[in-house]
């Protein structure tokens, strides 16, 4: 009975618990409507994302910050918004949940920006600093950091000089400050100055790489870069003193992060080709033009050397020389890997890359690059001592044609013979032409080895006092060679290897830097003081050696100069540059809304004599966040800032003030002599650049939109020039300061916006616009100086003085030009008065980034408004044995004709030849070269391996220079100087993160 009773009792207890559990489960499974409001503690936040954690379900708050979402009682809400810390809140059956978000210390306004010797934020910075990050860089198929910057930074004008792998770039930050001294910015890699001057030589590489400008920045793997900051105004650059006169480019590489060791492997392959061909005559049009030219000059019997129309060459034969010589498809391959991780006290990163790229030229040419980078950071347990060590090593091996074939592709007659004969040998067509592929028998090679290393030691001696030591070492060696075997010439000439030549050049540069620094900070309720004091000790040694060997027993020995019958040293020099300075910075914050920043530097440079060796430079920057006093709901941040300061410039070369000698090529009485090369002048001083700027920065609607407008004015004085001397002095010029004054001024506009931000989809856009003006304000005695034909007061430094083309005389059929002095003659000195300015007047870019679930689309357009040298630059007279742009069809034929091109000539009419020669030095070779370019496009899809790890696979397709919209007829509008233009690139890639 008792057992029965107990059994019934336990059955009842179990049944009650089962009913309670079922009731509870039904409640927890039931969906409920959760509503609430998201604020920052004061104002509502519109556009905040409210998600159900671990799902794709979510909503966005309205204009008043309100939301409503259907969820389960056991779900957790995840609330996020740009600039604020993400919050997770369990629902716990509550129907109403109000959320307050806190500003994120690492959010937009507080992202740490590298300013060189210190870091700042968007909110606190008083200077002008442009920035791109790894996020923008990794979406572009580029091999040089400068290519990744093009069009993305206001005030930064970057032009790629050639599409040949390993070539260089021209960079100007807010215009040209100096007339004759250097205008290159200072590059700083992980706190160490990085000399970007080319180690190449015009003698060996000048015919394939414009100016021999081989960019040392090719040694930096873009995928290792965390961010690039460009310092532009006085407040940002003055702490770098004379080295920062033309702006500063700060490159920061990636660091290891604490956490699980991660492995990243990526591979890509792609193709590249020229962006745009010139419209040239085909064979039918060309032959008709040539025949008309001879007929116009009354020549009925074609000369023996007019092979194109006298029957020697097939007049029905046609070759598109642009397609044959520069229309190939370059192939690119790249493999990268990195491993990183670490603990709370020690983090590491190790990465490597291999790259191979061929060319668009015929033949087997390629560029190989191997880079290895490492970084390790360590801090003591009490965080008082920190050490960081970064190293990078790059090997580049570049094999190129000895000569760029682009000019040949534009000028060769379209009915010229085939390149090869029936036996596969170079075709010389019975010595009737110069086969362009013969140039490929001569090859150019360079091998570059670059070592970059830096270390930072930091010790926190007291609570607010730190001691820091920055150390760096760079070593670069370039060995290049250009071989010119006798086989580049027509065999019929009868030359042999006794005329074969080889140019060998070696450039070496090594430098070190030590920068001890003291940092002190003091904070109170309303005031923050930061002091920085430091010194710089820097030394750089450069060597250059060039030698030419001529005459070899066999071309197989052309690699060995000791086998040459004649050796001639073309260049041999050793240079040493020493630099010492003291610098300081004082920064003050008041209530986090008023900011003052004062910097000063005293520089000493070995490029000046002892009496003028030191220069003093400094700047003052201020910023006021006026939005703190307005309390407007739509104004997230409003800031006014201004700066004023003085920087210097010592980019004049070494030993310019000394009286120097060189070894004479002409021995006397059997002895090698010395000849003077420069006069002693200890009196010249630093150039000075006074920079002024004012700007307004606004953040609207909880930072959904941010914009800035900046006006700057830079005036560079005390210009260092070569002052002309009378021939009786024995010297042509002497380095000296002249009272010339150069001004750069302009506006910079930037706009960033979050257009759409909803669960699973975001759309962000960015826009920058630069309007710049360069003016020579003063140049005493200009008209009487040797610079009278180069510069004009009130005009830019980059002008070309040209004849002014009036048109074609309807009676004579010849080009006519303005006779400025009315003497009836067209002369160089008096009549080249038309001024053409080739610098960009307006430039910028606009980017759009769209992200939908695992898909990402990034599109960037670059735009430039400028004039450029067109397709008629460097051409021969129309009617001669050279191909022409198709527009020459509109030429003068008879009296009364209205035409844009003068009468044809075979070269037998000296008057027509003179007129055409003057045309090539007139504004007839200048056209509107403005363009809009689809600079980059990237589409990627990320496939996560697991919802619980960061492991993923990312597939992407990327393009560079994809489309160009322009009215320019001279080929690619970015550069039109007869070298290979920048290439269109498309790559496919895969990246695995483990």
Image (spheres, rainbow, N blue to C red):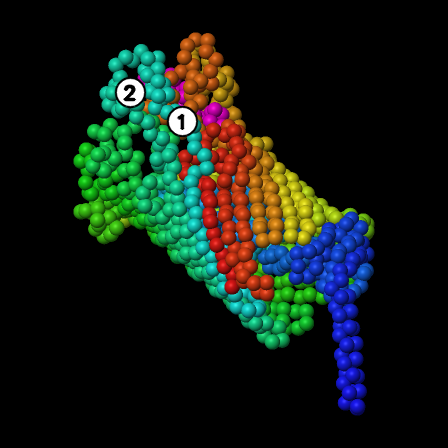
Distance between the alpha carbons at the discs numbered 1 and 2: 18 Å
Image spot of residue 397 (x, y percent): 36, 52
Q: Earlier in the sequence, mark 1 or mark 2?
A: 1
Q: Residue at x 43, y 28 (%)?
A: 279
Label for residue 736? none
Image spot of residue 378 (x, y percent): 55, 71
In which quadrant of the rendered view does residue 841 lie? top right
Image spot of residue 606 (x, y percent): 49, 54
In which quadrant of the rendered view does residue 946 lie? bottom right
Q: Residue at x 47, y 42 (%)?
A: 160
Q: Is residue 373 left or right of residue 877?
A: right
Q: Is residue 918 magenta?
A: yes
Image spot of residue 975 (x, y percent): 47, 36
Residue nearer the viewer, 893 or 223: 223
Label for residue 309? 2
Q: Is residue 548 magenta?
A: no
In which quadrant of the rendered view does residue 862 lie? top right
Q: Residue furthest bottom?
A: 2
Is residue 857 positioned above or below 966 on the image? below
Secondary structure state at the residue bearing disc 1: loop
Secondary structure state at the residue bearing disc 2: loop
| Residue position for label 1 | 280
Tell me if label 1 and label 2 are in contact, CB under 8 Å: no
Range of magenta residues: 905-926
């Amino acid at each position: 009975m008792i057992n029965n009773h107990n059994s019934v009792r336990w059955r009842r207890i179990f049944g009650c618990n089962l009913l309670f559990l079922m009731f509870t489960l039904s409640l927890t499974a039931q969906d409920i409507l959760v509503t609430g409001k998201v604020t920052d503690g004061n104002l509502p936040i519109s556009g905040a994302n409210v998600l159900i954690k671990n799902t794709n379900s979510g909503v966005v708050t309205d204009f008043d910050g309100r939301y409503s979402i259907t969820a389960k009682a056991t779900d957790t809400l995840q609330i996020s918004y740009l600039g604020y810390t993400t919050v997770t809140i369990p629902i716990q059956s509550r129907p109403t949940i109000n959320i307050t978000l806190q500003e994120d210390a690492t959010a937009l306004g507080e992202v740490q920006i590298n300013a060189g010797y210190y870091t700042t934020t968007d909110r606190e910075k008083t200077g002008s600093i442009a920035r791109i990050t790894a996020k923008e860089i990794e979406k572009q198929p580029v091999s040089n950091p400068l290519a990744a910057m093009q069009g993305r930074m206001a005030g930064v004008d970057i032009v790629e000089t050639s599409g040949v792998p390993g070539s260089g770039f021209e960079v100007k930050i807010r215009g040209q400050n100096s007339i004759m001294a250097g205008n290159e910015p200072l590059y700083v890699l992980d706190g160490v100055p990085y000399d970007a001057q080319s180690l190449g030589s015009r003698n060996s590489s000048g015919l394939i790489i414009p100016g021999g400008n081989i960019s040392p920045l090719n040694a930096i793997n873009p995928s290792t870069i965390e961010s690039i900051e460009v310092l532009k105004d006085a407040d940002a650059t003055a702490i770098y003193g004379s080295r920062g006169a033309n702006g500063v480019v700060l490159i920061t590489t990636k660091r290891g992060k604490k956490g699980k060791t991660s492995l990243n492997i990526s591979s890509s392959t792609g193709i590249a080709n020229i962006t745009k061909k010139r419209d040239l005559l085909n064979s039918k049009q060309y032959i008709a033009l040539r025949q008309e030219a001879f007929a116009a000059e009354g020549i009925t019997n074609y000369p023996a050397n007019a092979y194109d129309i006298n029957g020697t060459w097939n007049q029905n034969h046609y070759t598109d020389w642009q397609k044959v010589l520069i229309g190939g498809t370059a192939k690119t391959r790249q493999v990268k890997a990195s491993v990183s991780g670490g603990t709370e006290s020690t983090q590491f990163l190790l990465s490597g890359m291999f790259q191979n790229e061929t060319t668009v030229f015929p033949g087997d040419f390629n560029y190989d690059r191997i880079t290895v980078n490492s970084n390790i950071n360590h801090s003591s347990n009490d965080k008082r001592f920190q050490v960081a060590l970064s190293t990078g090593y790059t090997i580049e091996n570049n094999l190129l044609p000895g000569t760029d074939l682009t000019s040949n592709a534009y000028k060769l007659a379209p009915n010229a013979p085939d390149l090869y004969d029936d036996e596969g040998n170079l075709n010389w067509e019975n010595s009737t032409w110069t086969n362009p592929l013969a140039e490929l028998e001569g090859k150019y090679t360079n091998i570059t080895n670059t070592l970059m290393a830096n270390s930072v030691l930091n010790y926190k001696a007291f609570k607010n006092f730190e001691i820091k030591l920055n150390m760096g070492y760079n070593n670069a060696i370039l060995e290049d060679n250009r071989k010119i075997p006798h086989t580049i010439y027509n065999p019929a000439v009868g030359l042999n290897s006794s005329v074969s030549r080889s140019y060998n050049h070696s450039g070496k540069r090594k430098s070190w830097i030590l920068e001890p620094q003291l940092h002190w900070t003091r904070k109170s309720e309303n005031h923050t003081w930061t002091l920085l004091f430091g010194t710089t000790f820097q030394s750089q040694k450069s060597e250059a050696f060039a030698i030419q060997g001529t005459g070899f027993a066999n071309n197989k020995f052309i690699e060995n100069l000791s086998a040459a019958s004649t050796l001639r040293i073309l260049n041999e020099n050793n240079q040493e540059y020493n630099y010492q300075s003291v610098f300081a910075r004082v920064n003050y914050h008041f209530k986090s809304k008023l900011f003052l920043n004062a910097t000063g530097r005293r520089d000493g440079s070995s490029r000046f004599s002892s009496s003028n060796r030191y220069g003093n430079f400094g700047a003052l920057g201020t910023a006021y966040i006026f939005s703190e006093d307005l309390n407007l709901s739509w104004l997230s941040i409003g800031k006014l800032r201004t700066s004023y300061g003085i920087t210097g410039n010592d980019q004049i070369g070494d030993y310019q003030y000394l009286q120097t000698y060189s070894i004479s090529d002409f021995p006397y009485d059997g002895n090698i002599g010395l000849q003077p090369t420069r006069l002693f002048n200890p009196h010249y001083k630093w150039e000075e650049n006074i920079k002024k700027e004012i700007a307004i920065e606004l953040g609207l609607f909880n930072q959904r939109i941010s914009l800035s407008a900046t006006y700057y004015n830079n005036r560079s004085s005390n210009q260092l020039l070569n002052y002309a001397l009378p021939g009786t002095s024995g010297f042509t010029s002497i380095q000296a300061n002249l009272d010339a004054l150069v001004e750069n001024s302009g506006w910079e506009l930037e706009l960033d916006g979050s257009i759409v931000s909803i669960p699973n989809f975001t759309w962000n856009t960015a826009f920058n616009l630069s309007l710049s003006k360069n003016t020579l304000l003063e140049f005493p005695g200009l008209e009487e100086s040797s610079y009278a034909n180069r510069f004009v007061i009130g005009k830019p430094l980059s002008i070309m003085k040209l004849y002014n083309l009036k048109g074609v005389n309807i009676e004579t059929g010849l080009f006519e030009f303005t006779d400025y002095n009315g003497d009836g003659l067209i002369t160089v000195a008096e009549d080249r008065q038309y001024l053409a300015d080739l610098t960009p007047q307006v430039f910028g870019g606009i980017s759009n980034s769209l992200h939908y679930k695992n898909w990402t689309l990034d599109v960037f357009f670059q735009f430039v408004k400028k004039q450029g040298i067109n397709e008629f630059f460097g051409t021969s007279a129309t009617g001669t044995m050279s191909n022409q742009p198709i527009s020459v069809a509109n030429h003068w034929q008879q009296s009364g004709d209205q035409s844009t091109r003068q009468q044809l000539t075979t070269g037998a009419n000296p008057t027509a030849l003179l007129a055409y020669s003057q045309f090539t030095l007139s504004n007839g070779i200048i056209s509107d070269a403005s363009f809009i370019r689809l600079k980059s496009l990237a589409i990627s899809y990320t496939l996560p391996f697991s919802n619980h790890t960061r492991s993923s696979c990312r597939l992407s397709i990327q393009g560079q220079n994809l489309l160009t919209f322009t009215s320019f007829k001279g080929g690619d509008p970015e550069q039109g100087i007869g070298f290979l233009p920048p290439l269109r690139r498309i790559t496919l890639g895969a990246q695995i993160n483990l």
